[in-house]
Image: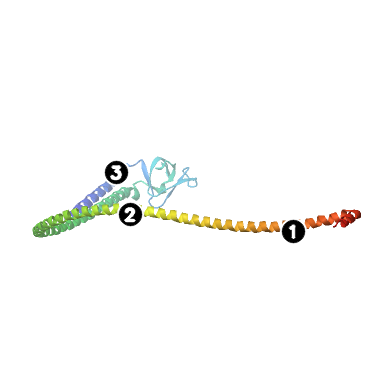
């Protein structure tokens, strides 16, 4: 844990040395860049079509950017920008030495990279601290667990002896229970036989009961038929009496009709016979 700050200090020192080295290289090599110039650090510079102040503006060059010199005169320099645009730039906007932006851009990049490295190392140190703390916690937990295991081992020795005694008692009880189970098995077989005999008797009684029920059904059916026959006989007697009465009535009516017919025939004959005949009849004793 104590070595982490020292390591960070060494890394920061190394990064600063690299930054200073890069800055010095930029300063010493700026004089060798005669084929390049830089746009002023103060403002954007207009790039024109020709070497005249009133010429059309082709583009606006960002401040501090490096450009390539193609040709030049007293007041203007023909340049080519980094993105390939060609035009004339007023000497007022031109720097012969590297601009501040150009000189410090590598430094800024190196510084940003160094800051990223420092952040990464800090995160790694924090992660290590967390791991160390976790390991300490695990060690403490292991010590506590080891103590608990030792205590349990001591109590287990006493428990084993007690369990052995209880095991002997259980064996004895198991033998007694086994003997009781044998007796119960014999009793169970006896009860099964009794149950089988009872079932046989029950089936026999059930069969007799079924026969009795069938006989009772047949008896009831015969009784119903006897009642029906008796009702039919009574109906026939009633019909016979009715027919007898009807026949008597018919005979009486027939006799009456016969008498009336005779009277009617006699009357008709008396009316239809001539008077002489009636006189002969009257003289003959009618």
Label 2 environment density (alpha carbons within 10 Å; few <14, some 14–19, many ≥20): few
Viewer-proximal residue among 168 and 204: 204
Is 2 drawn above or below residue 38 in the view shown? below
- What residue is drawn where x is 27% and y is 45%? 25
User: Is 182 left or right of 107, judged from the image as shown?
Assistant: left
For numbered disc 3, what is the local secondary structure? Answer: helix
User: Is 167 left or right of 245, judged from the image as shown?
Assistant: left
User: Is 285 left or right of 213, judged from the image as shown?
Assistant: right
Give the position of the N terminus as an image quadrant: bottom left
> Earlier along the polypeptide chain: callout 3 or callout 1?
3
Q: CA distance from mark 3 to mark 1?
A: 177 Å
Label 3 environment density (alpha carbons within 10 Å; few <14, some 14–19, many ≥20): few
Viewer-proximal residue among 213 and 74: 213
Viewer-proximal residue among 286 and 247: 286
Is 3 drawn above or below residue 71 in the view shown? below
Q: Quarter-wise, where is residue 68 in the image? A: top left
Of the two numbered discs 3 and 1 in the rendering, the one whose residue sits closer to the viewer: 1
Name the residue that disc number 1 marks. Answer: 256
Residue 152 image offset from top left, x and y in percent: 12, 59
> Earlier along the polypeptide chain: callout 2 or callout 1?
2
Residue 74 image offset from top left, x and y in percent: 42, 44
Viewer-proximal residue among 172 and 149: 172
User: Is 147 left or right of 226, judged from the image as shown?
Assistant: left
Residue 27 circle label? none
For numbered disc 2, what is the local secondary structure? Answer: helix
Name the residue that disc number 3 marks. Answer: 29
Name the residue that disc number 2 marks. Answer: 205
- What residue is drawn where x is 54% and y is 58%? 231
Residue 98 image offset from top left, x and y in percent: 34, 47
């Amino acid at each position: 844990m104590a070595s982490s700050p020292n390591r960070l200090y060494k890394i920061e020192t190394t990064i600063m040395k690299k930054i200073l080295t890069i800055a010095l290289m930029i300063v010493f090599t700026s004089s060798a860049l005669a084929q390049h110039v830089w746009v002023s650090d103060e403002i954007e510079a207009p790039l024109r079509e020709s070497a005249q102040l009133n010429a059309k503006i082709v583009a606006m060059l960002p401040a501090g950017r490096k450009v390539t010199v193609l040709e030049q005169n007293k007041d203007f320099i023909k340049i080519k920008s980094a993105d390939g645009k060609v035009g004339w730039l007023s000497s007022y906007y031109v720097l012969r030495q590297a601009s501040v932006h150009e000189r410090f851009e590598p430094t800024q990049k190196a510084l940003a990279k160094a800051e990223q490295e420092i952040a990464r190392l800090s995160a790694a140190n924090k992660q290590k601290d967390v791991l160390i703390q976790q390991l300490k916690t695990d060690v403490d937990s292991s010590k506590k667990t080891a103590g608990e295991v030792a205590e349990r081992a001591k109590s287990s020795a006493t428990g084993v002896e007690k369990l052995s005694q209880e095991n002997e008692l259980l064996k004895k009880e198991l033998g007694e229970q086994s003997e009781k189970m044998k007796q119960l098995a014999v009793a169970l077989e006896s009860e099964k036989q009794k149950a089988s005999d009872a079932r046989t008797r029950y089936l026999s009684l059930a069969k007799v009961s079924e026969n009795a029920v069938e006989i009772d059904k047949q008896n009831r059916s015969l009784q119903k038929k006897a009642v029906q026959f008796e009702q039919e006989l009574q109906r026939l007697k009633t019909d016979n009496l009715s027919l007898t009465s009807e026949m008597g009535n018919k005979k009486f009516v027939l006799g009456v009709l016969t008498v009336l017919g005779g009277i009617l025939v006699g009357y008709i004959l008396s009316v239809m016979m001539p008077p002489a005949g009636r006189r002969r009849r009257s003289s003959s004793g009618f």
